[in-house]
Image (spheres, grey):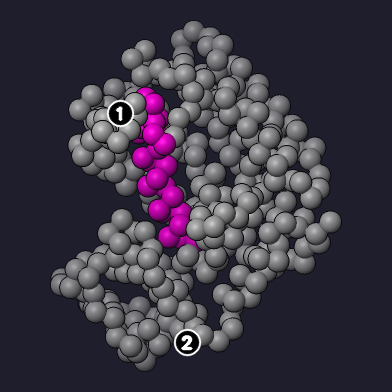
Amino acid sequence: MIVEISEHGSVLKRDHECFIVQTPTEKTEVPAEKIDAIIVTANALISTQAVSLCLEKNIQLVLANWSGKPFGRFWVSTPGRATENRRRQYLNQDTAVAFEVSKDIVARKLKAQRKLLVDLKGNRKTPNEAINNAINAITKSLHNLNNLEYTSSFKQTLLGIEGFAAAEYFLAISAVLPKKYVFKERSRQPAQDKFNAVLNYVYGLTYSTVEKVVILSGLDPNAGIYHADSYGKPTLVFDLIELFRAKVDRIVVKLFTKKYVKDSWFASSEEAPLGVFLSKEGRKAVITVYMNDACENIEKESWSYCRKMMPTLAKEGQVT
C-alpha cells in the first residue's frame, strides 16, 4: 500500500516495527510490512527513526509538492532490491526484454484508442468516415505490431507503427467535437486551439501522477525502455503515460461533447500570442475533473504496471 501524508501539521514517527501517522484530527498505526511507499505532500514532521525504518524495510520515502510531483527521496546507501531493479533496468534498455515491454505498451495504447473510437462510433446516429478511417488505421497498426520481431532498431519501428495511426486518430477525435472546437492537427507547446489546450493540461497532470508512482516503485524515471533517453527528461514516465492517453482523451472529449467547457476557461499569453492556454478558472475546473474521474485509477494502474515490469526487466536480455 502507498501511505500519503497530505495534511499540514502531520507527524510521521516509529513505534517498533510500525509507523505512526498523526494528523491534526486522527492517529493511525500501520505495520511497516504492509507499506510499499510513503509520500509526503504537506508540511510535516518526520522523525529520524521513521526514516530509519523506511531504509531498513526498503520502503520508498518521497517528498513531493502539493500536486504530488516528487522533488526528493530517501534511499539506503547500501545495495538492495531497488539497486538490483535499477541495474536490470539500465542493462535492458535496448535489449529484447525492452522490446517486449515496449511492444506491450504500444499494443495497449492502440487497443485503448480503438476502443474509444468504437464507442464514439456507436454514439453517432450517422456513419462517420473519419472514425472509420481511424479504426482501420489502428487495426492495421496492430496487425503490423503483432508481426513485429526484435531488431536493434525496434524503437524507431514502434514509433513508426504508432505514428501511422496518430494523424487519423486525431482527425476522428476532431470530427466528433462541436463545430466551434474542431481542430486541424495535434498541437502541443503552445496549443493552437481550445481542445488541445485542455488535452495538453490534462496530459501534464497525468505526467505528475505517473512520475510519482514510478519513483515510489523504485525504478529510475529517467531511464526509458521505449523512448530514447534524453538528458534531464523522465523518459520512463514518457513510456508509461502512453498507457493512459486514450483514458485522458476520453475525458477531454466528454468535456467538449457534453458542453461542459466554457469560453472563460481560456486565455492568451503575451509570450505566445498565437497560442491558447487555460485560464485560472479553466485550470481549476480541469483539475477537479481529473482528480474525480482519472487520478486514482491512473495511479493504481501505474503501480500495477511497474510491478509487472520488474520481473520482466529482471530477465537476461541480449543486445544484437
The residue that appears at 79% across and 50% down in the rendered structure is 152
The amino acid beneath tag 1 is Pro
Q: Which residue is mark 1?
A: 273
Q: Main secondary structure of the magenta part?
A: helix
Q: What is the quadrant of the C terminus in the image?
A: bottom right
Frontmost residue, 160 versus 101: 160
The amino acid beneath tag 2 is Glu
Q: Is residue 260 left or right of residue 222?
A: left
Q: How many marks?
A: 2
Q: Which residue is mark 2?
A: 56
Q: Which type of secondary structure does the marked residue at label 2 adopt?
A: helix
Q: Which mark is residue 183?
A: none
Q: What is the quadrant of the N terminus in the image?
A: bottom left
The magenta segment is: 189-214
119, above or below 79, in the image: above
Q: Is residue 272 left or right of residue 308?
A: left
Q: CA distance from mark 2 to mark 1?
A: 53 Å
Instruction: Find the residue positioned furthest to the left.
Output: 24
The residue that appears at 57% across and 25% down in the rendered structure is 167
Instruction: Find the residue positioned furthest to the top.
Output: 126
| Foreground label between 2 and 1 | 1
Frontmost residue, 80 versus 197: 197
The residue that appears at 40% across and 45% down in the rendered structure is 204
x and y percentages locating residue 286 in the rendered image? 29, 38
